[in-house]
Image (cartoon, coloured by chain):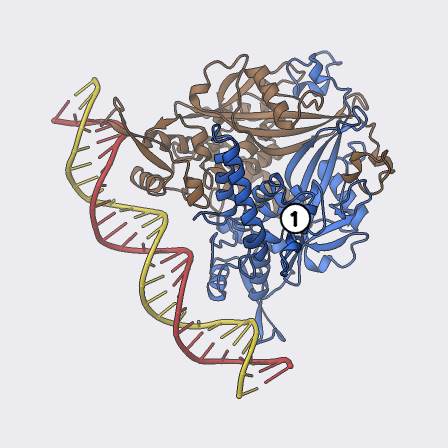
Chain colours: A brown, B blue, C yellow, D red
Amino acid sequence: MAPEVREIDHVLPARAALPAARAEEPISVGLSAVIVSVLGDEPMVAVVPNRGAHAHDAALPCGRFSPRQHKTLEAGLRFWVRQQTGIELGVARQICTLGESPQEEFPGQDPAVVSVCYLAPVRPEHCGEAGDATWQSWYAYFPWEDWRRGKPQCLSEVIEPRLEAWAAIALEDCADNADHDGLERSRRLRIAFGRDGATWDEEKVLERYELLCEAGLAGDGAEVIQQARSVGRLVPTLTHPVLGDHARVLASAIGELRRCLKCEPIIFQLMPEVFTLFELQKTVEAILGPHLHKQNFRRLVESGGLVEPTGEHRLRTGGRPARLYRFRRDVVLERLAPGVRVKAGRG
Amino acid sequence: MAPEVREIDHVLPARAALPAARAEEPISVGLSAVIVSVLGDEPMVAVVPNRGAHAHDAALPCGRFSPRQHKTLEAGLRFWVRQQTGIELGVARQICTLGESPQEEFPGQDPAVVSVCYLAPVRPEHCGEAGDATWQSWYAYFPWEDWRRGKPQCLSEVIEPRLEAWAAIALEDCADNADHDGLERSRRLRIAFGRDGATWDEEKVLERYELLCEAGLAGDGAEVIQQARSVGRLVPTLTHPVLGDHARVLASAIGELRRCLKCEPIIFQLMPEVFTLFELQKTVEAILGPHLHKQNFRRLVESGGLVEPTGEHRLRTGGRPARLYRFRRDVVLERLAPGVRVKAGRG
DNA sequence: TCAAAAGTGTTATCCTTACACCCATGT
DNA sequence: ACATGGGTGTAAGGATAACACTTTTGA
């Protein structure tokens, strides 16, 4: 073949001459990181102060991908995270790529942005110094996801009634095109929020957040906080700090973490080298909600070959000294989906 | 805030003045689609003729994302797929985003490419006219993944011996830095290919492909085809047609499909509106490999509420007429992970 | 008549769930 | 002493895997 044929061609074999395919169109590629850890039984995410134009209190660590400087997307991510938080990431897994169109008001001025988003678990012992970054409980952003003390108040008292109303309105307004909005809304509600006999699925974090946004209950959030205050009782407000588009990314990341907790040993990337089974359970529960009672959880994890005792013990646990355990790295050779196989649903 | 503050800032809050963050650097964003279907018990992927410089016989349908023309990444994807194959996509799920650095030989000439890749299942009845595209069995690219007739020959006779050798060489060469290459290699081999007592995990398609590439057994492929022929018997060659980087994408997509088959009703996006349980089983087996015998599969899927009988029957099945079934869309309201819960492993 | 596929029924086994109960430490 | 968490045993229940067997068609 002729030498002037360009590498790019194997990715774009056909119709490269169409206007849609001009290379000159400037696109910038962003990288964002959801850096999670569990500190003192609380699931945390690293956020950095936001200096942008929007009324967001904080943002996820992020930056622009520069192919000249970084060989891979992940290398770029590590660079920005190191820069902004001082954290040296271990593993990072891609969760999604979002496209954001340029603002209508300033056409041609902003390059369009595509954001590649990552989930990066960090052990608690590496969370000490984090530069400008701070750790924030992720339930501060999504209080309805926190079932550790039973069903959250804000769900029953604020979210559910208002979502029902929102679905009902749609039913009246467009009763004719049923499968489009009306029926769809209440159906989505049932699925995402476990209404009406359906079960709450802790993995559907993004679905729930998107419904709340559509219903005006999350997103910019101002309206909701007022609503919550007007109830007159102590009601958790929805979305204290505002993350803007990054809230969607955080929601995806939480969902993904909850999902893969069950079939991969990813939980051990959030644990210190040695730990007690109780600590492990608390960490799992921080992420998923309460699930198993002690005895069964222990059996599950020990007889499942996920952990092995170190022989050491930990004193001052509040009770009897506890055996210390470590992750048994060989599980991945023996079992097929070596996660914490807690059953989705109550426990 | 001042009006000249740009929208982009909320994505890039910090250190925007660093050289790494220049907006002028040209990056092009590609979109690729792995369009899968199951035609006559064979899992297929849509490929288009490759007009590029490389010796690839074909490529996945793909194109460049143009934010001016398409509101979202998915809209862009649909555009290119329609253009190149005539197929109107139903659902499409993102599977990964790959970064590809510019070629060293032509510095500054090629804009760097980031590819966002999608998996799109298509029903067999929509596969008739596909423009320039053709349907290719995905096992043509990855014959070692096809366990429908037992363990594939090419695995035992070509791949396994050569991979073992490849791992052994590394062990000798660098016996000192054990955890880096040597031990790593044989460990990865065990995990990906189920060697040495470990079980074959059908979901690890990408891991296997990457190992084969590293070992020189896949990728450009020429060497392997020679090897396979030299055996003298009828041995399936590895990677007949060559897809270049798109093979990685295809591998990811197959893995993802196999994964989510088990916990989502995605299989029904590959089935016609009505079908027999046998057809359903054949489709599942085409994707995963053989797993359950008939009776248990039927019970699983029927008592699991995934399907409901239509009341109709299909004649000329080769045997007794079979009941026709349809997908019960309400499962998603009742069950938590409503997939075809076939156990990973033999059946 | 036979092969092939559709169906029915039953049993053994494993895994999960749930409950009851004892142990060791710090306050 | 008692609260708190650590740790053991065991029985009930449900889901799955494996088996054997009958039915109905087309060639």
**Residue A90, above or below B82:** above
Point out the image quarter for the C terminus of chain A.
top left
Residue at point 55%, 23% (across, down): A226
| Residue A157 percent across, percent down from the top left | 47, 33
The front one of A43 and A145 is: A43
Image position of B245 (left or right of B344): right
**Residue A186, above or below A327:** below
| Residue A320 percent across, percent down from the top left | 22, 28
Q: Residues within 10 Å of mark 1 (few under 14, many from 20)?
A: many
Q: Quadrant of residue A101?
A: top right
| Residue B30 percent across, percent down from the top left | 74, 35
Residue at point 63%, 18% (across, down): A55
Image position of A305 (left or right of A160): left
Q: Is residue A288 visible?
A: yes
The front one of A58 and A65 is: A65
Q: Quadrant of residue A163?
A: top right
Q: Residue type at mark 1: give it.
A: Val
Point out the image quarter for the N terminus of chain A.
top right
Image position of A144 (left or right of A297): right
Q: Is residue A175 visible?
A: no
Which chain hosts label 1?
B
Q: Which residue is mark 1?
A: B224
Considering the numbered disc 1 on the image, is that residue within a helix, a strand or a loop? helix
**Residue B135, above or below A180:** below
| Residue B248 percent across, percent down from the top left | 65, 42
